[in-house]
Amino acid sequence: MRERTDVCGRFAPSPSGRMHLGNVFCAVLAWLSARSRGGRFLLRIEDLDVRRCKPEHARLLEEDLAWLGLDWDEGGRRGGPDGPYFQSECSELYAQALQMLKEHARVYPCFCSRADLHAASAPHLSDGAVLYGGRCARLSPAEADALRRRRAPALRIAVPEESVSFTDGHLGHFSQNLARECGDFILRRSDGIYAYQLAVAVDDARMGVTQVVRGQDLLSSTPRQIFLQRLLGLPTPEYYHLPLLVNAEGVRLSKREKSLDMGALRARFTPAELTGWLAFLAGQQPAPEPVYEGGARSPPKPTNPYIVVSISQKRHFEQQKCKGFLHRVCEAFFGRVYRKNGAKRGFWPSFGRKRPSAPRRGKKRGRRG
Ligand code: GLU
């Protein structure tokens, strides 16, 4: 494993479609955060689910990042000393981690179907996710063997009645009781695909990642990742969870919406405009100006004091600037794009709207098991 003395950031997209504005927002801020500290930056392709993720999307992703001028030292097709950088090539590493976890915690087969999990009696969390009731945790070895003859099981890890807390660089203190707010979670699916939680915990550590800058939709996954890191004796990076950009209906952007994907954005804006506006929107610079000098593969402007401040300054920014200001900023730039595509209302990110959902503890918001 890498020494953790040097700052190392990463962008870890899933190539399930073309990047949209929200993905670009994460990429810009992750890049700025690492580069402005003189750190390494790496690109990890999270293509665990080979049915949803396509090599052509991964190729486009690299091309779009290069077009934006967001360079990386290692990863993607460029490779590097901590490869593989494509999760689809890392099964052996995840299998080793799984083996270690079995030595330190209870890992058990789970035969529940999706329908079983969503049964009316299952406790549902507010976002529709299901708290696993532990049905298969109670199976005897003989019962499990009998079921195994009929179908391949997923593997779950039993979680303790314990809270995992961390300080998010943007949102502050966050705590989750694993047993009550998350439940025993999946490490490997019944089709043999390793779970995102396990893969990310292993990969961030083996690649020497010291800071994780990503969307707030992954906030509730973080305690699970920290729990796994602790069991595996791995270091915990710093975390910064960013507000999600939403569309005119207030729904987070998805790769299905083509109006704000990189194809549409590249046709309308220059890389300097896009990255400059996004950095400005996040409070990283006083004006929507280019974030780097001299085009691709050059470091952030060393003279700009806003870029070298921590991303956590955005909290201050949020408190200081009024909602109306953010609306105007977004309307002035991205709203233009959005209206061109037929939307009636403007488009703005979720900052300045209701307080981010994160600090309301007790809710499982992640989309991953
Ligand atoms: N692969 C995830 C995504 O595209 C991001 C994972 C992470 O940053 O930890 O949403």
Image (cartoon, rainbow, N blue to C red):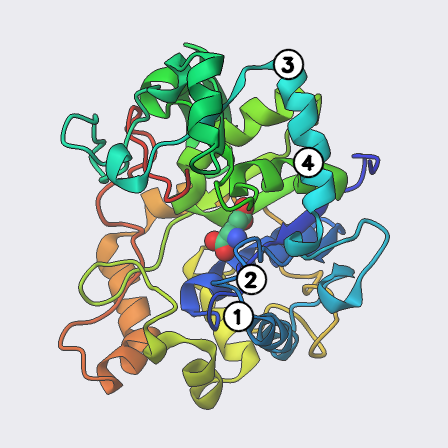
Q: Nearer the viewer, residue 133 or 332?
A: 133
Q: Nearer the viewer, mark 3 or mark 4?
A: 4
Which comes sooner in the sequence, label 4 or label 2?
A: 2
The disc at residue 104 is 3
| Marks 2 and 1 in Cβ contact (< 8 Å) | yes
Residue 174 % position (x, y): 42, 26
Q: Nearer the viewer, mark 3 or mark 1?
A: 3
Mark 4 to mark 1: distance in Å?
38 Å
**Which picture quadrant has residue 218?**
top left
Residue furthest bottom as drawn: 267
- Give the class, few, some or many, for how many residues have Cα within 10 Å of label 4's Cα (few <14, many ≥20): some
Which comes sooner in the sequence, label 2 or label 3?
A: 2
Residue to which mark 4 is pinned: 95
Q: Secondary structure at mark 1?
A: helix
Q: Amino acid at mark 3?
A: His
Mark 4 to mark 2: distance in Å?
33 Å
Q: Secondary structure at mark 4?
A: helix
Residue 188 appears left or right of 74: left
